[in-house]
Image (tube, coloured by chain):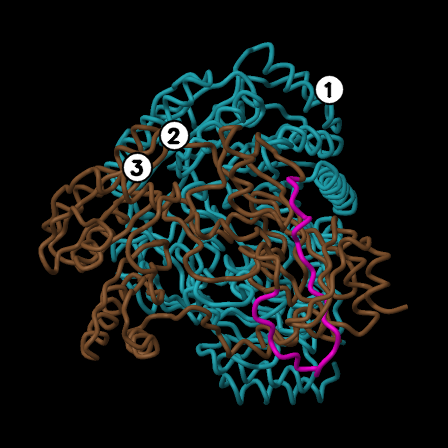
Chain colours: A cyan, B brown
C-alpha cells in the first residue's frame, strides 16, 4: 500500500480508536508479525525480518469499535487479523496479507458470574490465568488450564478450540460454551446464546468455535463454570509399556470414571521426565488451588512466578540428545556417535528402556467435590492396579502438578542455542491409537529426536503429544528438517485415520493438510465462510480456505 | 422421462410411490449412493426434496418460498443398518433410518447401550433425532444427544456426499458435523452418523423422596448436581400430579415427589444416590417409598403405561427459571379457573423441562411461561436467519433441500 493510503488509513483508524490505541510504529508491526510458531522463531533467531507485517495494530475496548473497523475494512478491502496472547504455535495470528491486527487484550472484563446457571460472561481478551484467578476468588473454575495459561486469552482459546491439562474432566473449551458474541464479516454483532437445546437450527456456537478468526471476531462469551474443587488427588503409576498403559486408561474412562488428568509417558519421555523432577524429593504440601501470581490490574500479562527447578527441563535434555550431548546418567559415546542420526537415537532409547525394564510412567489426578472425588479416586486407582499398573505414590503426581506450566517458558534458551523444538498433538479413537503412535513416531523419528505422552483421554479416544527436537548448523537446514517432520508426521496421522490437531489449531502450519483432514466436508466450512465473511476480510490465507481478499 | 420414471431407475419400482396428501413422490433409497442419486435427479428435474423419518409419512410440509414445484419425499426406512460397531472405542456407525430403540436392541446383547436418554426420544429415527433440535433429548448423565454425535454422513443439494471425520476431539476448524445436526435437512440429507455409546452400567439404583415443595425439590436437585452427582434420571412431580400418577402415595398439598435413578460402577451409583438423599434432607425432605421410584422407572423405561392424561405442553427453562416458570404456568391455569399439574424432568446443563397438564387454554399458559423466562418448543434465534439463508444459498442455490423449513 502506498504512503497516501497509509496516511488515510491511520486517520480512519484514529477516528475509531483515538490516537493512543492505534499503532503503526515499526516495533509494534514487527512484534505482531508473528506468534510463537517455532518455524518463525527459527527465522527470527537468524535475524530474518518477518515476511509479512500488519499495516497497523489496534486495541479496541468495545465491540462497537470492532464493528466500525469491520465496516472500514470492507470498504477498503483490508484484511483483519485477531490477536490474543500471541501464544499460538501454528502461525494463526500471522498477518499473511498485511491488514489490521486487532489486539483484544484491552477487552478483559469478567463481567458476571451467574451462580444459579453456572455460567459466566467474559470478554475475549482476558488473560487465561487472570480469568481462572478471578473465578477462583468467587468460588468457581472454568477448568481450562493450558500450559500457555499465562500468555493466552479466553478469545484465543475459543478461536482455536484449545484444551487444558484437566480436559478429561472438564472437556475442551468448546464443550463449555453456552454462547458467543461475535462480529461477523457483515459488520454485525451476533449472539449465539440461548439454551442451545431449545433453539432450532444448526449450532452457530460450534461453527464459530475453532474458526481461528476466519469467520468472525469473538468479542465475549458465556462460558460454563464449575464450583471450585474441594479436593485434589494425584498419584503416579508405572506400567509395563505403552500398550498396557493405553489399555489401562481406556478401562478407566470407559467405566464412567472422570479423572481430571491422565498422562502416560513413553519410554524416552519417562526417562527424561524422571531425571528432571518426577522422582525428586518434594514437599507434600498441597499448593494453593490458584496459581501463585499476584493479580495485575492492568492489561499487561502477569509475571511468571518464581522459578521452576534450576536443573534443565526435559525439553532441554531432549535437545541435548538431538545435539548429540547425551543426558546425565546416559552421557557419553553412544550419543556422540549418533550425532545427526536421530533415527538411531530414537531406536537406541527404545532398546535401553526395554533392557532396563523401566516401563512407562503414568500420572493421574482427580479433583472436584469432596465426597464424589474420594469415591471416584478409589475406583480409578483400583482399576489401574487391576490393569497391571504399579502404584508409585503421590509424589510423581504432585511433582507434575507443580511443574505443569514450566515447559512452555523454557523454549527461548533452546532456540538461542541453535536448536529447535516443537510439539505435534494428534488424536484418534482407541481402536487406532497405537497405530497412530507408532506411525507418527516413526515418521518424526526419521528427522528428529522424538518422545511422546498420551493425555486428554475420553471414552472414545485420546490425544498423543509428540515433542521433537532437532539441530542443524544454519536456519535453512533447520527449516528443511522442521518442514520434513511436519510433512511426514501429518501424512502419517491422516493415513491411520487420526486428526491432525487435538488443541493447537491449524493456522498456517497445518493449512496444507486440512483437505486431507476434512476432504469433501471442507465444502461446509467454505459455505460458512461465504455466509459469515462474504468479502473474505477475516484472517485470509489460513486454515486451507480459499482467500479472495487482495 | 418423467421424474417418477427417472427415480424408478435409481432405486427400483418397488421403492417409489405416489402420494396424494401431501402430493409428491415417496422414494426409499437403500443406500447412501442411492440417496445421492435421488437428490441429483430430483434437483435436475427442478423438484424439492424433503426427508421422511421413522414415521414413514411426511407430516407438516412448509410452504415452498420458490413457489409450487414437484416434491420428492426421501424416506430413510431402508437405511436401517449398523455400518460398523467399534467396541474398543465405544462408537457405532449407524444409518439414519434406524430408530434409537432398534439400535438399543442391537447393542444390548453385547453389553452396550446408546445411553440413558428418554426412551420416548429414541422412538424416532436417528436421522430425525439428530436433524431436529428440540429440548429434552438429553440425560443428566450423558448430556445432550447431539453431543454424542462424532461424525455425520450427508448428501448435499448437488448430490455430493460429505463424511465429517471421526475424532474424539479436534482443533481443525469448526465442528462441521454440528452444521448438519439441527439443520432439519436444509443443509444436507443425513444418511448415517457415528455415535458415542456406553457400556451397560454395573449397577442401577432408584430412590424416591418427598419434599416440602416443588421449590425445595428443584433446590435439592441442583444442590446434588453441584456436588457432582450424575444421575441417569430425575423427575419432580407436584402433589396434584403425584396423586394422579401414584394413587397410593400420600403427599400433603404443596409437597413434591422426587424420583431419582443412578447408574455406573456400584460404589459410584450408590454415592450419587446418597448425594441426592443428602441434598433432599438439606432441603427439608425425607426418603419416600422405594416402590414409587421403581414404578416410575418401569413406566419410563419398560413401557408400562402411565395413568392420567398426557401433558398438554412442555416448557424449557434454565436452572434459575425452573421455579418461576413452573409457578407461572400453574398459577395462570388456576386464575382462569382450571386445574393444572406438572412434573419436571430431562435435566441437563441447560436446565430442565416443565411438563404441564391442564385443561386451560394452552396459549394462555404458554404466554405466562414465556413471560417468566421459559422457552417454548420450536423456539428459534431469528436474528441468525440471514446467516442460515446465506449458508444454504452457498450449498443449495436452488433451495431444493427441505424448502420452507427454518426460514
Say which residue label 2 marks.
A397
- Characterize the local packing of mark 3: few (<14), some (14-19) or many (20 or more) Cα atoms within 10 angstroms: some
Q: Residue furthest right?
A: B1
Regarding mark 1 in the picture, which secondary structure is present there?
Answer: helix
Q: Which residues are magenta?
A: B58-82
**Mark 2 or mark 1, which has the lower sequence index?**
1
The quadrant the C terminus of chain A occupies is bottom right
Image height check: is B63 above or below B395?
Answer: below
Indicate the position of residue A120 as horizontal and vertical percent values. Answer: 35, 63
* A188 horizontally vs A531: left or right: left
Q: CA distance from mark 2 to mark 3?
A: 11 Å
Indicate the position of residue A389 as horizontal and vertical percent values. Answer: 45, 18
Circle 1 chain: A
Q: Are marks 2 and 1 in contact (CB under 8 Å)?
A: no
Mark 1 vs mark 3: same chain? yes
Quarter of the image for residue B22 reads bottom right
Say which residue label 3 marks.
A232
Circle 2 chain: A
Mark 2 vs mark 3: same chain? yes
Q: CA distance from mark 1 to mark 3?
A: 46 Å
For residue A337, which numbered disc appears in the image?
1
Image height check: is B287 above or below A68?
Answer: above
Q: Residue furthest front?
A: B20
- Characterize the local packing of mark 1: few (<14), some (14-19) or many (20 or more) Cα atoms within 10 angstroms: few
- Characterize the local packing of mark 2: few (<14), some (14-19) or many (20 or more) Cα atoms within 10 angstroms: many
Regarding mark 3 in the picture, which secondary structure is present there?
Answer: strand
**Mark 1 or mark 3, which has the lower sequence index?**
3
Q: Is residue B66 magenta?
A: yes
Quarter of the image for residue A449 reads top right
Instruction: Mark 2 vs mark 3: give the one in front.
Output: 3
Indicate the position of residue A150 as horizontal and vertical percent values. Answer: 43, 53
**Which residue: 69% across, 34% down?**
A440
Amino acid at each position: 500500500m502506498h504512503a497516501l493510503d497509509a496516511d488515510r488509513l491511520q486517520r480512519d483508524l484514529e477516528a475509531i480508536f483515538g490516537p493512543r490505541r492505534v499503532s503503526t510504529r515499526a516495533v509494534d508491526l514487527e512484534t505482531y508479525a508473528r506468534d510463537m510458531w517455532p518455524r518463525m522463531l527459527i527465522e527470527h533467531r537468524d535475524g530474518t525480518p518477518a515476511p509479512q507485517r500488519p499495516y497497523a495494530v489496534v486495541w479496541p475496548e468495545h465491540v462497537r469499535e470492532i464493528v466500525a473497523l469491520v465496516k472500514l475494512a470492507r470498504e477498503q478491502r483490508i484484511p483483519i487479523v485477531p490477536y490474543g496472547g500471541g501464544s499460538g504455535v501454528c502461525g494463526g495470528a500471522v498477518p499473511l496479507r498485511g491488514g489490521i491486527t486487532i489486539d483484544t487484550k484491552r477487552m478483559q472484563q469478567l463481567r458476571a458470574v451467574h451462580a444459579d446457571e453456572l455460567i459466566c460472561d467474559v470478554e475475549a481478551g482476558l488473560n487465561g490465568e487472570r480469568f481462572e484467578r478471578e473465578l477462583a476468588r468467587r468460588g468457581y473454575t472454568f477448568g481450562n488450564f493450558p500450559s500457555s495459561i499465562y500468555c493466552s486469552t479466553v478469545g484465543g482459546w475459543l478461536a482455536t478450540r484449545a484444551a487444558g491439562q484437566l480436559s478429561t474432566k472438564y472437556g475442551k473449551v468448546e464443550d463449555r460454551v453456552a454462547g458467543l458474541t461475535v462480529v461477523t464479516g457483515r459488520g454485525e454483532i451476533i449472539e449465539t446464546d440461548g439454551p442451545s437445546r431449545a433453539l432450532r437450527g444448526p449450532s452457530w456456537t460450534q461453527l464459530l468455535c475453532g474458526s481461528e478468526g476466519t469467520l468472525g471476531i469473538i468479542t465475549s462469551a458465556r462460558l460454563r463454570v464449575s464450583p471450585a474443587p474441594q479436593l485434589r488427588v494425584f498419584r503416579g503409576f508405572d506400567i509395563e509399556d505403552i500398550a498396557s498403559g493405553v489399555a489401562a486408561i481406556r478401562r478407566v474412562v470407559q467405566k464412567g470414571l472422570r479423572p481430571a488428568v491422565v498422562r502416560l509417558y513413553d519410554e524416552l519421555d519417562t526417562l527424561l521426565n524422571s531425571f528432571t523432577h518426577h522422582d525428586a524429593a518434594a514437599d507434600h504440601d498441597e499448593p494453593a488451588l490458584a496459581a501463585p501470581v499476584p493479580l495485575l490490574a492492568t492489561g499487561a500479562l502477569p509475571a511468571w512466578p518464581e522459578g521452576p527447578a534450576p536443573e534443565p527441563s526435559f525439553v532441554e535434555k531432549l535437545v541435548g540428545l538431538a545435539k548429540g550431548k547425551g543426558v546425565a546418567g546416559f552421557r557419553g559415546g553412544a550419543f556422540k556417535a549418533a550425532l545427526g542420526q536421530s533415527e538411531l537415537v530414537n531406536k537406541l532409547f527404545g532398546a535401553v528402556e526395554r533392557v532396563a525394564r523401566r516401563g512407562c510412567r503414568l500420572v493421574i489426578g482427580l479433583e472436584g467435590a469432596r465426597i464424589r472425588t474420594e469415591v471416584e479416586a478409589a475406583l480409578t486407582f483400583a482399576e489401574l492396579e487391576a490393569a497391571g499398573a504399579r502404584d508409585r505414590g503421590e509424589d510423581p503426581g504432585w511433582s507434575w502438578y507443580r511443574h505443569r506450566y514450566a515447559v512452555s517458558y523454557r523454549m527461548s534458551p533452546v532456540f538461542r542455542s541453535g536448536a529447535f523444538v516443537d510439539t505435534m498433538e494428534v488424536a484418534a479413537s482407541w481402536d487406532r491409537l497405537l497405530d497412530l503412535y507408532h506411525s507418527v513416531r516413526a515418521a518424526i523419528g526419521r528427522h528428529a529426536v522424538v518422545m511422546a505422552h498420551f493425555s486428554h483421554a475420553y471414552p472414545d479416544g485420546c490425544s498423543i503429544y509428540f515433542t521433537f527436537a532437532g539441530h542443524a548448523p544454519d536456519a535453512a537446514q533447520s527449516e528443511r528438517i522442521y518442514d520434513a517432520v511436519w510433512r511426514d508426521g501429518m501424512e502419517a496421522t491422516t493415513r491411520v485415520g487420526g486428526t491432525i490437531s487435538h488443541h493447537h489449531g491449524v493456522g498456517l502450519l497445518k493449512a496444507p493438510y486440512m483437505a486431507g483432514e476434512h476432504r469433501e466436508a471442507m465444502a461446509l466450512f467454505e459455505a460458512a465462510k461465504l455466509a459469515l465473511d462474504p468479502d473474505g476480510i477475516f484472517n485470509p490465507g489460513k486454515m486451507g480456505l480459499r482467500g479472495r481478499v487482495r | 422421462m418423467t421424474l417418477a420414471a427417472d427415480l424408478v431407475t435409481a432405486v427400483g419400482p418397488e421403492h417409489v410411490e405416489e402420494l396424494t396428501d401431501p402430493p409428491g413422490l415417496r422414494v426409499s433409497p437403500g443406500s447412501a449412493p442411492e440417496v445421492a442419486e435421488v437428490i441429483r435427479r430430483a434437483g435436475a428435474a427442478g423438484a424439492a426434496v424433503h426427508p421422511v423419518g421413522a414415521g414413514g409419512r411426511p407430516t407438516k410440509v412448509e410452504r415452498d418460498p420458490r413457489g409450487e414445484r414437484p416434491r420428492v419425499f426421501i424416506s430413510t426406512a431402508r437405511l436401517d443398518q449398523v455400518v460398523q460397531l467399534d467396541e474398543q472405542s465405544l462408537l457405532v456407525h449407524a444409518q439414519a433410518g434406524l430408530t434409537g430403540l432398534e439400535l438399543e436392541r442391537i447393542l444390548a446383547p453385547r453389553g452396550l447401550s446408546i445411553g440413558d436418554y428418554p426412551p420416548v426420544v429414541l422412538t424416532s429415527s436417528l436421522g430425525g433425532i439428530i436433524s431436529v433440535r428440540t429440548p429434552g433429548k438429553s440425560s443428566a448423565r450423558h448430556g445432550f444427544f447431539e453431543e454424542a454425535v462424532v461424525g455425520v454422513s450427508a448428501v448435499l443439494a448437488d448430490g455430493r456426499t460429505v463424511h465429517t471425520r471421526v475424532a474424539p476431539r479436534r482443533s481443525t476448524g469448526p465442528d462441521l458435523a454440528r452444521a448438519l445436526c439441527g439443520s432439519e435437512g436444509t443443509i444436507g440429507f443425513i444418511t448415517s452418523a457415528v455415535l458415542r455409546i456406553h457400556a451397560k452400567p454395573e449397577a442401577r439404583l432408584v430412590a424416591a423422596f418427598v419434599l416440602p415443595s416443588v421449590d425445595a425439590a428443584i433446590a435439592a436437585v441442583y444442590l446434588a448436581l453441584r456436588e457432582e452427582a450424575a444421575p441417569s434420571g430425575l423427575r419432580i412431580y407436584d402433589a396434584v400430579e403425584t396423586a394422579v400418577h401414584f394413587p397410593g402415595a400420600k403427599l400433603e398439598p404443596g409437597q413434591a415427589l422426587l424420583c431419582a435413578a443412578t447408574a455406573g460402577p456400584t460404589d459410584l451409583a450408590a454415592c450419587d444416590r446418597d448425594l441426592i438423599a443428602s441434598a433432599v434432607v438439606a432441603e427439608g425432605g425425607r426418603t419416600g417409598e422405594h416402590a414409587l421410584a421403581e414404578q416410575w422407572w418401569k413406566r419410563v423405561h419398560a413401557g408400562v403405561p402411565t395413568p392420567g392424561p398426557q401433558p398438554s405442553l412442555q416448557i424449557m427453562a434454565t436452572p434459575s427459571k425452573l421455579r418461576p416458570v413452573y409457578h407461572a404456568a400453574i398459577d395462570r391455569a388456576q386464575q382462569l379457573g382450571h386445574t393444572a399439574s406438572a412434573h419436571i424432568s430431562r435435566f441437563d446443563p441447560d436446565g430442565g423441562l416443565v411438563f404441564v397438564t391442564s385443561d386451560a387454554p394452552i396459549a394462555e399458559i404458554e404466554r405466562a411461561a414465556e413471560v417468566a423466562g421459559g422457552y417454548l418448543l420450536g423456539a428459534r434465534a431469528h436474528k441468525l436467519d440471514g446467516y442460515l439463508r446465506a449458508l444454504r444459498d452457498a450449498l443449495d442455490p436452488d433451495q431444493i433441500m427441505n424448502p420452507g423449513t427454518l426460514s
